[in-house]
Image (cartoon, rainbow, N blue to C red):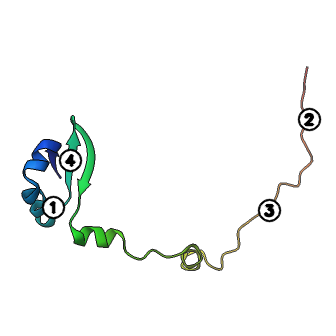
Amino acid sequence: MTTWPVQEAKARLGELLKKSATEGPQTITVRGCPTAVVLSQADFERLQGAKPGFVELMRSSPLVGVEPDAGRDRSLTRQVDVA
């Protein structure tokens, strides 16, 4: 991922946009700290793709139909020495 200082990103915006489309995401830094990422439209749409709802996700689980072992320990309580 290429890193661009904010001043250079402003001055060369067209190049930054072309590189995001051809080379992938581009990072913009402010005072050396990563602040933003420029993505191509295709990458953005891929990331925003349809995500399953909770119910659909649970129904597609490989554990559908498996009963959990929810048994409890039925033994008597243990003796504790508090002295």
Residue 67: mark: none
Check if mark 3's residue and mark 4's residue have beta carbons within 8 Å: no
Residue situated in front as seen by the camera: 8 or 74: 8
Measured Cα–Cα span from mark 3 to mark 2: 22 Å
> Which label sits in the foreground, 1 or 3?
1
Residue marked by disc 1? 20
Q: Quadrant of residue 7?
A: top left
Measured Cα–Cα span from mark 1 to mark 3: 55 Å
Q: Which residue occupies 20% across, 66% down?
A: 40
Q: Is residue 50 above or below residue 27?
A: below
Residue 79: mark: 2
Residue marked by disc 3? 71
> What amino acid type should be assigned to the residue bearing mark 3?
Gly
> What amino acid type should be assigned to the residue bearing mark 1?
Ser
Measured Cα–Cα span from mark 2 to mark 1: 67 Å
Q: Is residue 21 above or below residue 72?
A: below
Residue 30: x and y, percent?
A: 23, 39
